[in-house]
Image (tube, grey):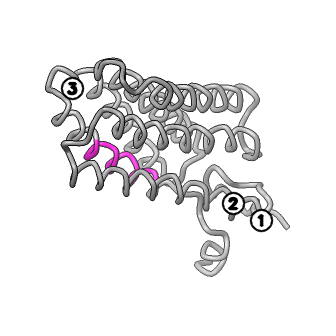
Amino acid sequence: MTASTGNQGPAAGMPLGMLKVHRGQLIAVAAVGIVLGVIGLIFPDATVLTVAILFGSYLIASGIFRITTAFIADHLSAGLRWITGLLGLLVVIAGILCLSNPFDTIVVLALVIGIGWIAEGVIDLMGALRGAIVPRWLGIVSGIISIAAGVAMFVLPAAGVVSLVFIGSALLIAVSATTLLTLPRDQKKVRAAR
């Protein structure tokens, strides 16, 4: 049994079991992002090591989700599948860089985080423009927020570690919340609404 009843977002055409895994991964990544963002807001005096672990872990989880999407989403063209997979790989690499050398300067850490968020934003915008995210405006908003958060990370390092942690945590919560808004639709609810 597949989930190919009309255009229902990025998971259309996926077997129902895979759809549940896909939704579960996305919910887990967003929930981790929100929790890490709240921790960052509560403890803005965190060290660079703590920041690297928090954001690096988030980026790795998010990148793995993007790579998985490239493999399991039937609706993606070959080109979009490759771009999604490669951008997911870049997000994973950004996360690994955060974890591998956390004592580098805060500027490098902010740049790595920014690159990861910009990559996520590009993926969301492309998905929205191709109609893979329904409604499209949520994908566009999610993409814009992720790209804006990434660009902000390029500007923030001069503000200092505490400001970077505080503002970066708030941006992480915003990016994660918009991710939850662009979840693939639950097929049972879609059928019940008809």
Q: Nearer the viewer, residue 82 or 152?
A: 152
Mark 1 / mark 3, whichever is N-terminal = 1
Residue 149 in percent (x, y) is at 31, 34
Q: Is mark 2 on a helix, strand or loop?
A: helix
Horizontally, residue 33 falls left or right of residue 62, namely left
Give me the disc on residue 156. Answer: 3
Horizontally, residue 176 falls left or right of residue 80, namely left
Q: Distance between the residues labelled 1 and 2?
A: 7 Å
Residue projecting furthest to the right: 1
- The amino acid beneath tag 2 is Val
Q: Given contact means CB atoms under 8 Å apart, are the residues at marks 1 and 2 in contact?
A: yes
Q: In this view, does 42 lie above or below 139?
A: below
Q: How far apart are marks 2 and 3 (CA)?
A: 36 Å
The magenta segment is 169-179
* Residue on which the image places disc 1: 17
User: Can residue 62 be spotted in the picture?
Assistant: yes
Q: Nearer the viewer, residue 123 or 117?
A: 117
* Residue on which the image places disc 2: 21
Q: How far apart are marks 1 and 3 (CA)?
A: 42 Å
Q: Quadrant of the C terminus?
A: bottom right
Residue 40 in percent (x, y) is at 27, 48
